[in-house]
């Protein structure tokens, strides 16, 4: 039996992070699974409210579970950025392994109160489900933005992180540490990289001692990823990079076969292009940095 808690505990011990990749169709799911299978590393599949609405809540559960069962492989399903208890209860009942319960847009007191209530309600549905809470501002939308939003005021402090974890009982915390959702064009071109506040990550880890998730990982400096993992990040979310590869390779495949209408002839190069991105990220996240070389 594959257990997401064991996977996170092993990642912590080994000083690596589990890759989390969002999917919105079977092409993306095939790419994520086949990459993880090839590298023989556990993987989290994410589906946001929008992605779930498109794929179907129970349908995505059936797809991921079928891969886990048929291949006896540690692939898990996370309900990414879920903004209401009703939606969270829906995915808990449907069989998701974890939920990002995200009320970070609400005032602090409301976020704490409603997240605490959600943790109790959701564990009542499935005691082993993992609940992730979110504080601070990491922007919205895994897409191409015009400019970098000013998120500097929304960074998470270690004191806030400790208080939030203690008062809500969340299993996992998503802090704001210089990360942001989406990319700007210069990041897509590779000219600009996101930079992370490594000291802040280490301080939040010391204060909370819970697994930490880095959201909005697309376009982040590789060395910052390694240092962030060494400082205590256990899960890293990548979405926009996959979406960019998906669209570009789909356009290229269509241009190359202008008369083709058979989906399974048009789509394999798209799977391959997305898989390449996933593989390079999984290889990076799963390469442990020796202790002492982290800073
Ligand atoms: Zn996110």
Image: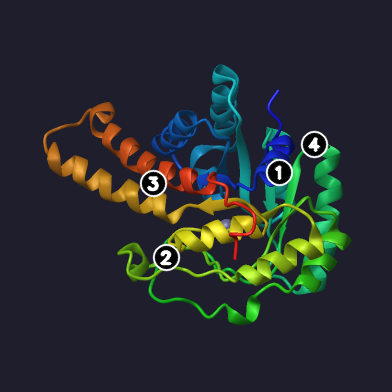
Instruction: Give the residue at mark 1.
Output: 13
Residues marked 4 and 2 touching at CB (< 8 Å):
no
Residues marked 4 and 1 touching at CB (< 8 Å):
no
Asked whether mark 1 and ligand 1 are closer than 8 Å, the reply comes as: no
**Alpha carbon distance from label 2 to label 3:** 15 Å
Task: State the image quarter where residue 59 is shown.
Answer: top right
Disc on the earlier residue, 3 or 4: 4
How packed mark 2 is, by other alpha carbons closer than 10 Å (few <14, some 14-19, many 20 or more), is many
Horizontal relation, residue 251 to residue 36: left or right? left
Instruction: Give the residue at mark 2.
Output: 183
Horizontal relation, residue 31 to residue 263: left or right? right
Instruction: Give the residue at mark 4.
Output: 128
- Image quadrant of ligand 1 equals bottom right
**Alpha carbon distance from label 3 to label 4:** 31 Å
Residue at image position (42%, 65%) is 183
Please identify, in this view, whether the residue under mark 3 or under mark 4 is nearer the observer: 3
């Amino acid at each position: 039996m594959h257990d997401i808690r064991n996977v996170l505990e092993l990642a912590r011990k080994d000083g690596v992070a589990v890759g989390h990749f969002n999917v919105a169709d079977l092409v993306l799911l095939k790419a994520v699974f086949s990459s993880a299978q090839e590298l023989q590393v556990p993987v989290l599949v994410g589906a946001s409210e929008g992605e779930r609405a498109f794929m179907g809540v129970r349908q995505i559960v059936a797809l991921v579970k079928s891969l886990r069962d048929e291949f006896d492989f540690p692939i898990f399903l996370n309900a990414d950025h879920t903004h209401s208890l009703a939606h969270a209860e829906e995915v808990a009942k449907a069989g998701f392994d974890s939920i990002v319960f995200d009320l970070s847009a609400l005032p602090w007191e409301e976020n704490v109160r409603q997240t605490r209530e959600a943790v109790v309600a959701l564990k009542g549905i499935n005691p082993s489900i993992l609940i992730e809470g979110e504080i601070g501002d990491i922007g919205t939308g895994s897409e191409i933005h015009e400019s970098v939003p000013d998120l500097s005021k929304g960074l998470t402090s270690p004191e806030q992180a400790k208080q939030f974890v203690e008062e809500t009982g969340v299993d996992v915390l998503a802090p704001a540490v210089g990360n942001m959702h989406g990319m700007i064009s210069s990041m897509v071109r590779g000219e600009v990289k996101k930079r992370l506040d490594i000291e802040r990550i280490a301080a939040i880890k010391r204060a909370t001692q819970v697994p930490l998730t880095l959201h909005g990982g697309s376009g982040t400096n590789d060395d910052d990823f390694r240092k962030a993992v060494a400082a205590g990040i256990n899960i890293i979310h990548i979405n926009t990079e996959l979406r960019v590869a998906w669209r570009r390779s789909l356009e290229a495949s269509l241009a190359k076969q202008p008369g083709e209408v058979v989906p399974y002839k048009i789509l394999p190069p798209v799977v391959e292009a997305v898989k390449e991105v996933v593989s390079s990220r999984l290889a990076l996240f799963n390469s442990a940095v020796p202790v002492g070389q982290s800073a």
